[in-house]
């Protein structure tokens, strides 16, 4: 029982890491990204390729963060910036994720990939009542570190204040002399970078196929909706609650409820409080 | 006055053209019964029926549903699975399929009353995924001593299969009916209500349009079309699988067809199906095994290009050009 709860919390922290990029994109860039999970999967596959070439997956985290961030800047500059209508954004990002999935299928086939190394694939036993999976612990630590880093960055630095200003009110921020295009690019860099880190931890935890991106995208969206789209606090709390619920319900009811429980949470949230826990605006 | 006469001539020509096309499609199985062509066209018409359903909701009412393959799958499963597993008579199966689709459609319409845009699209994906998991988990049964259903999929009983020419004519007939229905909707008060809801729901409500009522009616009619597509699909294939019938890809196919043709025009879904369905089926069947990623890349590229270049589809620009040329002709004559 304790193992279940701790596992749920650790998984929740990793989910928070996945969702925080999505929530940043929505809050600052006004972008509804239906392909976010698939971009995380790109990082998983790159990490897997490097791992097969003999590189430790933990070393790849920072280069992949930068690589996906630059990819994000390119996409923002050439595609996202042009599409303003939310429905069209859904379609365009979904189309892009389909193209990515197709390319990944073409290059790696549909065989599931997974990275198993002794460092991550072990269990820490605390007494005989608690068992922690190493990779989940590392992922949770990374998630806490990155989320608090992001929080400090947004709260304490001048650039962070500018990002928050753009998220609050873009035209006024523009009038105050904030280069909103630069802020958009920076946000794209950060959010895609977070997706990369999440992707690396996902491939160390689970078997992935190119289409798995859609599943994680859905989870990330439900977390963001639950916590409030655009709120980092919301992503953290939403991740914890959803991770916990998913673990407990699929243990006690059956694995097929994995998405059903999430979906019920989603519908209830939207019916009772459409802005989510900490959300300020609606899509 | 003269302009309207010229338009009358344009419409007459268009009617003649449509008449010739319809006759050609109707006579095809008697004149040139090649299995490959008929099968391709049959698949095309199944896609077209579903796309007509999608266009009513997505094109006219402005609800971007991504869960329409749920109706499709319910239709196919209620016909094939209930017959094989429980011996339910096909007619009762068809009624049950339509009934369950209508109930689901009412649910989706109720969701659309509270959720707009992105949230609505997301919840339709959610419904689709939930149904897929339920079908994977709860449809197991024993058939000829072997486990069947669930993730393995359901074989279609030979008694349910229609001969190819019957299936072809049936699906073409339903496409014609559907296109005519959309044409009538476009001219009617009902259609104008739907377009008003699409353009601005709040303004429409403030002007006295019963928004929820018309959304519900549109969703129900659209679900019935998708379900009929599912019936025809089930009766012209050999095997059903939750991953292929309740798949997001199939929903996206419906969306691509409707949007490619022009989802706000009555002829759009049919034109889109004639372009897209043979193309994607060809790619899937011939190159899908050697280049597994190709169908997805193709779908994604086309979807991306449609929404970046011309979200209205290909029919409206052609219509505009056609009428413009007529206008120039009028000036020359005067």
Image (spheres, rainbow, N blue to C red):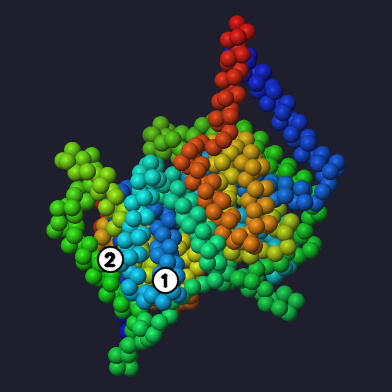
For residue B176, what is the image quadrant? top right
Residue at numbered disc 2: A236
Residue B144 seen in this snapshot: yes
Q: Is residue B271 left or right of residue A146?
A: right
For residue A222, what is the image quadrant? bottom left
Q: Chain of mark 2?
A: A
In the displayed structure, A93 sits above or below B192; it is: below
Q: Chain of mark 1?
A: A
Point out residue B198 in the picture as x, y percentages from the top left corner.
Answer: 46, 38
Q: Which mark is residue A255?
A: none
Nearest the eye: A279 or A126: A126
In the displayed structure, B12 sits above or below A63; it is: above
Q: Which residue occupies 35% across, 46% down?
A: A77
Q: Secondary structure at mark 1?
A: helix
Point out residue A139 in the picture as x, y percentages from the top left corner.
Answer: 32, 74
- Mark 1 and mark 2: span between their CA atoms? 30 Å
Residue at numbered disc 1: A50
Nearest the eye: A147 or B228: A147
Q: Which residue occupies 63% across, 15% down?
A: B6
Lower sequence index among marks 1 and 2:
1
């Amino acid at each position: 029982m304790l193992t279940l709860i701790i596992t749920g919390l650790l998984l929740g922290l990793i989910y928070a890491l996945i969702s925080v990029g999505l929530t940043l994109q929505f809050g600052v860039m006004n972008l509804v990204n239906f392909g976010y999970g698939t971009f995380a999967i790109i990082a998983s596959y790159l990490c897997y390729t490097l791992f097969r070439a003999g590189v430790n997956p933990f070393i790849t985290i920072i280069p992949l963060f930068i690589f996906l961030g630059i990819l994000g800047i390119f996409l923002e500059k050439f595609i996202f910036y042009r599409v303003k209508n939310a429905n069209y954004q859904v379609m365009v990002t979904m189309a892009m994720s389909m193209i990515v999935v197709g390319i990944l299928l073409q290059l790696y086939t549909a065989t599931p990939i997974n990275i198993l190394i002794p460092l991550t694939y072990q269990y820490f036993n605390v007494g005989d009542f608690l068992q922690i999976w190493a990779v989940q612990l590392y992922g949770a630590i990374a998630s806490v570190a990155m989320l608090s880093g992001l929080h400090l960055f947004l709260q304490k630095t001048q650039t962070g204040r500018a990002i928050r200003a753009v998220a609050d009110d873009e035209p006024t921020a523009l009038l105050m002399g904030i280069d909103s295009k630069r802020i958009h690019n920076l946000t794209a860099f950060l959010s895609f970078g977070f997706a990369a880190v999440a992707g690396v931890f996902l491939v160390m935890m689970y078997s992935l196929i190119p289409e798995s991106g859609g599943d994680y995208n859905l989870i990330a969206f439900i977390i963001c909706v639950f916590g409030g789209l655009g709120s980092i606090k919301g992503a953290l709390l939403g991740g914890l609650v959803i991770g916990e619920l998913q673990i407990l319900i699929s243990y006690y009811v059956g694995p097929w409820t994995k998405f059903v429980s999430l979906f019920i949470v989603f519908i209830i949230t939207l019916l009772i409080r459409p802005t989510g826990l900490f959300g300020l605006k609606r899509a | 006055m003269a302009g309207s006469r010229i338009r009358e001539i344009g419409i007459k020509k268009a009617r003649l053209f449509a008449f010739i096309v319809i006759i050609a499609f109707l006579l095809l199985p008697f004149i040139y019964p090649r299995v490959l062509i008929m099968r391709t066209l049959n698949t095309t018409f199944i896609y077209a029926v579903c796309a007509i359903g999608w266009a009513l909701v997505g094109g006219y009412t402005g609800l971007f549903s991504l869960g329409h393959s749920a109706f499709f799958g319910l239709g196919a499963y209620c016909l094939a699975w209930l017959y094989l597993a429980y011996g339910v008579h096909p007619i009762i199966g068809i009624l049950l399929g339509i009934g369950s689709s209508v109930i689901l459609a009412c649910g989706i319409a109720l969701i659309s009353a509270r959720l707009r845009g992105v949230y609505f699209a997301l919840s339709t994906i959610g419904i689709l995924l939930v149904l897929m998991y339920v079908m994977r988990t709860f449809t197991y049964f024993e058939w000829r001593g072997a486990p069947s259903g669930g993730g393995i999929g359901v074989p279609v009983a030979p008694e349910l299969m229609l001969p190819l020419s019957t299936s072809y004519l049936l699906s073409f007939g339903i496409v014609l009916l559907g296109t005519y229905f959309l044409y009538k909707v476009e001219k009617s008060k009902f259609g104008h209500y739907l377009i008003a809801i699409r353009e601005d729901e709040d303004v429409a409500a403030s002007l006295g349009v019963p928004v929820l009522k018309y959304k519900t009616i549109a969703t129900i009619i659209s679900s019935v079309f998708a379900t009929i597509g599912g019936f025809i699909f089930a009766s012209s294939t050999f095997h059903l699988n939750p991953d292929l019938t309740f798949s997001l890809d199939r929903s996206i196919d419906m969306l691509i067809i409707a949007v490619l043709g022009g989802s706000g025009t009555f002829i759009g879904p049919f034109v889109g199906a004639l372009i897209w369905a043979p193309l994607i089926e060809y790619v899937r069947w011939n190159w899908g095994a050697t280049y597994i990623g190709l169908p997805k890349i193709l779908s994604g590229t086309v979807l991306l290009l449609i929404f970046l270049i011309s979200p209205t589809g290909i029919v409206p620009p052609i219509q505009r050009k056609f009428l413009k040329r007529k206008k120039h002709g009028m000036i020359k004559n005067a």
